[in-house]
């Protein structure tokens, strides 16, 4: 079953509409969706390494556009949409404390969250709530999201065939490890940060 799912994913990664799906996932991940675009980006680059830079660019641009949507949610719709999103990720109770830090370090927080596993959508919404300068927000988002996605693309472009062989050889173990780490990440975000 896992092998069929992997083969299907690799086949879909080369589909002509795959870039549009990646753009949609990347956009929504930056504003409200919990699944990172890396899950699509990795098989897409492994399936078509010659398109690595295009895939990273699409992912970056869509992510920044989604970040601007998250900013708008924070600035215009926090009470109705933003607050439930922030609560879903477990940050509502620490919102006041976070606002103080954000006033001093806003641009750096955006830049740091853009390259880390921290839920970027919380930062985009917070940026809108705090009215972070839109130009500063946009520049920090382009640089950090671009850095994240282009480094991943470069690594997959350079080391793709051995990585693909490793994944195919150890797929069941890697899938188990992925789900354990995903669960641990949600637990850590909920209780440690």
Image (cartoon, rainbow, N blue to C red):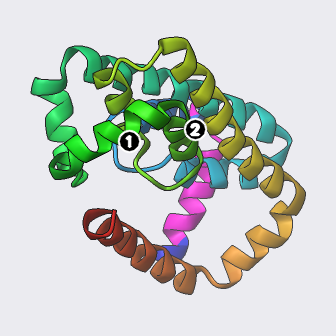
Q: Which residue is mark 1?
A: 101
Q: Residues within 10 Å of mark 2 (few under 14, many from 20)?
A: many
Secondary structure, mark 2, is helix
Q: Quadrant of the C terminus?
A: bottom left
Residue carrying label 2 = 111
Q: Residue 148: x and y, percent?
A: 66, 45
Over which residues does the magenta segment extend? 4-17
Q: Quadrant of the N terminus?
A: bottom left
Relative to residue 95, is residue 67 depicted above or below? above
- Indicate the quadrant where residue 3 lies: bottom right
- Mark 2 or 1, which is nearer the eye? 1
Question: What element does badge 1 sit on?
Answer: helix
Give coordinates of residue 47: x percent, y percent.
73, 52
Examine the image and state in which quarter residue 51 appears. top right
Sequence-wise, the earlier of marks 2 and 1 is: 1
Answer above or below: position of 92 versus 168.
Answer: above
Q: Please, what is the dominant secondary structure of the magenta stretch?
A: helix
**Which residue shows up at 50% across the image and 81% down it?**
177
What's the distance in space between the residues labelled 2 and 1, CA to CA? 14 Å
Q: Is residue 8 magenta?
A: yes
Q: Do we see residue 16 in this rendering?
A: no
What is the x, y in percent for residue 181?
Answer: 45, 75
The answer to whether residue 96 is seen in the rendering is: yes
Instruction: Measuring from the top left, give residue 62's x and y in whole percent.
Output: 54, 26
Q: Residue at x 86, y 63 (%)?
A: 159
Q: In front: 114, or 20?
A: 114
Q: Is residue 87 above or below residue 189?
A: above
């Amino acid at each position: 079953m896992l092998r069929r799912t992997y083969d299907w994913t690799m086949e879909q990664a080369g589909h002509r509409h795959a870039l549009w799906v990646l753009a949609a996932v990347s956009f929504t991940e930056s504003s409200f969706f919990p699944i990172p675009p890396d899950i699509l980006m990795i098989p897409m680059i492994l399936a078509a390494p010659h398109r690595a830079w295009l895939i990273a660019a699409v992912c970056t641009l869509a992510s920044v556009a989604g970040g601007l949507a998250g900013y708008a949610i924070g600035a215009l719709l926090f009470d109705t949409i933003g607050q439930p999103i922030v609560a879903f990720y477990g940050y509502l109770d620490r919102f006041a404390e976070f606002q103080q830090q954000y006033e001093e370090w806003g641009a750096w927080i955006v830049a740091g969250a853009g390259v880390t596993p921290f839920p970027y959508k919380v930062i985009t919404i917070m940026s809108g709530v705090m009215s972070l300068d839109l130009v500063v927000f946009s520049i920090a988002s382009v640089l950090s999201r671009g850095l994240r996605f282009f480094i991943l693309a470069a690594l997959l472009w350079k080391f793709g065939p051995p990585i693909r062989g490793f994944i195919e050889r150890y797929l069941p173990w890697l899938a188990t490890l992925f789900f354990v780490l995903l669960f641990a990440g949600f637990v850590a975000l909920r209780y440690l940060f």
